[in-house]
Image (cartoon, rainbow, N blue to C red):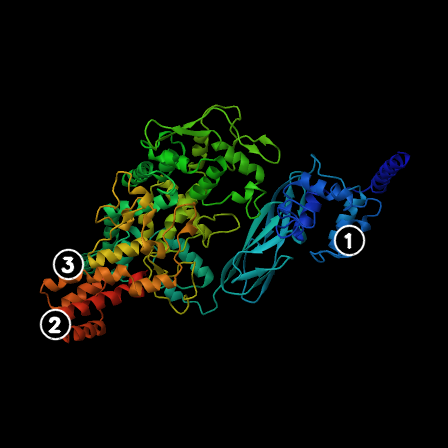
Amino acid sequence: MPGRLSSVVSSILLLVSASGAHAQEAAPSFRNQIQPILARYGCSSGACHGSAAGQGGFRLSLRGYDDAGDYLSITRSAQGRRVTLEDPARSLLLLKATKRVPHKGGEKIKEGWPEYQVLADWIAHGAPGPQEQDARIQRITVSPLHASVKNGQQQPLKVTAYFNDGRQEDVTRWAKYTAGNTSVATVDDDGVVKVVGNGEGTVTAWYLSQLAIATITAPYEHPPLAATFDAFKPRNFIDHEVVTKLKELNLPPSGQCTDAEFIRRAFLDTLGILPTPDETRAFVSDAQPAKRDRLIQSLLERPEFVDYWSYKWSDLLLVNSDKLPVQPMWSYYQWIRRNVEQNAPWDVMVRDLLTSTGSTLENGAGNFFTLHDEPTRLAETVSTAFMGMSIACAKCHNHPMEKWTHDQYYAFANLFSRVRSKNGVVTDERVVFASTDGDLVQPLSGKALAPTPLDAQPVSLTATSDRRKPLADWLTAPENPYFSRAITNRVWKNFFGTALVEAVDDLRMTNPASNEALLSAAASHLVKQKFDLKVLIRTILESETYQRSSVALPENQGDTRYYSRYYPRRLMAEVMLDAVSQVTAVPTSFNMDKRNANKGIGSAYPMGYRALQLPDSHTSSYFLDSFGRPDRVQTCDCERTNEPSMAQALHIANGDTLNLKLGKADNRIGTLLASGRPDVELVEDAYLWCVSRPPTENERQGVLKVLSEAPSAAEKRLVLEDVFWGLMSSREFLFNH
């Protein structure tokens, strides 16, 4: 006992001695100086002590989001061996970092570095912990904010931190840097950017969970082509913003596409179908001005528009009979379709969804809460679907690539903690309602946080009203930039293949748009039009940017994200299958999932259903599965894939889909042959059906020669089947261009 008492007294004397020796200088702040050093040199990274299990018995929070927990881990765990107050240089924290004792992480700092001195001073001051009166960081800035740098040159960055006590500090040395497009620019640990390619790249600076973005532009290195830019005649704000970016990058735009290219492109992107030969002929021969605008307006009024966009939003909202009973699934789909038919503004549709109550059979929107029946799942789904951002990382720690904190995640999720459902009076019916009690507990503190929309005012914990209503008010408000940008970005990707922000579910601060001014202008345009998506679609279709040729110029062939031309892309699975059925005039038979066959609605959809009219993704189809149809299991654009595969190539070449439809006696080929029309017209129709253009002279003569040599009607049919097969297996058919 006397020995233990003596030890305690000695420790106290050491602490007093340390405090006295350094009384004239302030101790380094654990919150604002020690934590940034541990993050900067990777100690609190996910690959080291910041992992869920830590390393070597030493665990820190990821990038230091938990100050109190990290302080205890450093100074109290392992019997306090990590800091030696009487001799800071002997502290394990420093010995490991300088590798004076074995360290799996290697050498992180050297004894002469400022980081070493800050850590040593902190220990010498008695290793004080985070204090309530500590200055709190408010923001950081990076400069230059936007720099134009030639390929091969370097650009150093400077990062400044601003605190709530009015202090600002140069933290360039302790910030962490990440390059967003390493094919354009890279960045080292000291914030020096090196340009390695042409285009535009970004660098993210991170310090104390604050983020700032610098943009680096590396113009393409060829003589400026003023005449090419002069030929680009902007029609609307989209064209103005695009050409501004192209001039900045010295990236000339391609010319305008042909009428035949435009009608095919617009039909596929807006309706998901091909134009008929008669529609193509009439459009191409029309000599009246503004014919493209008239075509666009007619597309927006067609019933296929409803089919196509109902299917798109069913993908987003996960209409799936594997997760919902069949009747609720139909109710959910019909709710979506009704909104598209009525051209309901996007904010109205989303508000109705988020505040839905009552029977899931009568109010299909209520099925959203059957699919996502837990507060954190609802929070993550809502943020992804309607704000285009994932906050899932903040469930365990502060988001490492975004500003959202662990507390914000649970405050946001608490908005959904009182959503309940119960069985209805009939089979498969659920009734959704809002309870007046129940809260989600934040796991670190063990307490419920006031329910709070992201970046908004909290809702009272004691209020008994439906918390989803203030959430819906905040989410759909015109001034909420996340909401309008997310849906604008999704619609944009549908028409250009490449979104302004890729991926469309990743609209985080550290993943900026390829043309920020354009995305902001388009989102503002949508807000001004009261979230009328048809207006946004019309504006996109009417733009010269959308009507660019897909043929690259030598100077813009390397462009994949600035819209100097239209980017060819493979048709999505459902559109491709419908196109095959349309060209051959042989509809596809769609069988329902076997588990649904005995539900009283039959085992197959009525003949004539197109793939884009199916309400349910849980429908048997080898073709759709092979070509990347989404499963509608999670809210993520990554579920749909356009990646090529051997299965796709083999199915196009030898699969049943094309071969059986081409061989059917009364298909398109049979009808053409029975019409008695001359071979030259049959060949022209084949090309117009498949690729929306007449054959070239060489193509025409080549096919006519083979047809004339056919010894019989049966052989002639086989030749025509081969012509259709050759066209439908070509890139020109399989891709929109």
Observer-nearest of 11 and 484: 11
- Residue 304 on image: x %, y %: 25, 48
Q: Secondary structure at mark 1?
A: helix
Q: Which residue is mark 3?
A: 666
- Residue 236 on image: x %, y %: 35, 51
**What's the distance in space between the residues labelled 3 and 2, CA to CA?**
18 Å
User: Do the residues under discs 3 and 2 have CB atoms within 8 angstroms?
Assistant: no
Q: Is residue 420 left or right of residue 71?
A: left
- Residue 737 on image: x %, y %: 32, 61
- Residue 694 on image: x %, y %: 21, 66
Residue type, mark 2 in image:
Ser
Q: Is residue 568 above or below residue 460?
A: below
Q: Which residue is mark 2?
A: 712
Q: Secondary structure at mark 2?
A: loop
- Within 10 angstroms of label 2, few (less than 14), some, or many (20 or more) residues? few
Identify the image quadrant of the N terminus. top right
Q: Is residue 237 visible?
A: no
Q: Which residue is mark 1?
A: 95
